[in-house]
Amino acid sequence: MSPRLQIVGAGLLGTSVGLALARTEWQIWVADADPAAQQLAGELGTGTAGWAQTEPDLVLLCVPPSALFDVMEAVVNLYPTATVSDVSSIKTYPQQEAKKLGAGDRFVGGHPMAGRERSGPVAAQSDLFEARPWAICADESVSSERIELVMSLARACGADPLVVDAQAHDEAVALISHLPQVAASAVAGQLGDAEDLALRLAGQGLRDTVRIAGSDPALWTDILHANARALAPHVSQLALDLTRVAEALDQIAMSDTTGALDRDVDKKIERFLDRGRSGISQIPGKHGAPAADYTVVPVVIPDEPGALARLFASVAASGSSVEDIALEHSAGHPVGVIELSVRPADAQGLVEQLHADGWSSH
């Protein structure tokens, strides 16, 4: 029989789950406290708007942490035997709340490692979870059948389920998800009083750094509050590192010489930057493989319809496998630069093909 899923919360994640499952065998209902969001999610093709009249196999809670307990309580009473899961980025808190409600043996926490800086059903994407990890956290009292049901949901959405301990999960995301949000918000916060010239000169580096700072402040306040214990040490260490850099820069700014003192201070700054570079090298490559070094091939691309399609046709003709793409386009200019990251062995052949097809590449 087709599995039956009740989604509660028609925001970015809830609606994206519905869209991802739209062409599968899953039967889906989507409910939301906001009637407009619920209706829009249904019209987008996520499933039937509202609540399932008979008990579903799985209920997926896609609501903010501050609303999770009340929604979970209503759901476990409405559907007394269904497996319950969620998508929140903190896993110890939902697990504790499920136990308080007497539903610890049928709650399987989940966290798809995917998202956007935009929110709401209009931001949903059917491919949001493709090839992304989906953490699965369950108490020892939960049956393997219930765990497998949630894992099958993740796989049906295109994600890669990974069973992890709830506390270990929260400690991990504090570093790789919640700390970057704090850092991006700190940098973006400096832009409020920026001069017009500085903003006009802003390039892709700034945009890449602050992109996630555009996320919903209310949602992220909930997340940071719920994971404060794991996050606080990382924020403190970041603040300490930045304080040391600030002190070094102050020393340079106040120095009247360019002698040994300045060189010693420069070494402190260099060590700070080198540590960051070393950290990047620890991030896994594709499919969890060790990080790999790629050759970046920059290509000048005109801002006109069909340009990307023609460029990708040239890439395909070269036989190269593009591992990553970055596009930089300055406002007011008729061209941009697209950076193609390829394996070093493919770089020369790609450049030759691009030149043969009339592209400006270096």
Image (tube, helix red, strand yellow):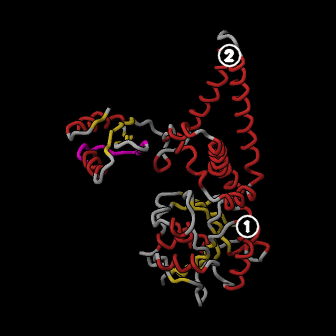
Answer yes or no: do the residues labelled 2 and 1 have beta carbons within 8 Å?
A: no
Q: Position of residue 336 (x, y in %)?
A: 37, 42
Mark 2 element type? helix
> Hey, what amino acid is under mark 2?
Asp
Residue shown at 62%/51% (left/top)? Answer: 177
Q: Position of residue 288 (x, y in %)?
A: 50, 48
Residue shown at 74%/51% (left/top)? Answer: 230
Q: Is residue 152 above or below residue 195?
A: below
* Residues packed near mark 2 inside 10 Å, few (<14), some (14 to 19) or many (20 plus): few
In this view, the residue in front, 278 or 33, is: 33
Q: Is residue 75 left or right of residue 131?
A: right
Is residue 308 rendered magenta in the image? no
> Hey, what amino acid is under mark 1?
Ser
Which numbered disc covers residue 264? Answer: 2
In this view, the residue in front, 2 or 250, is: 250
Residue under label 1: 66
Farthest left residue? 356
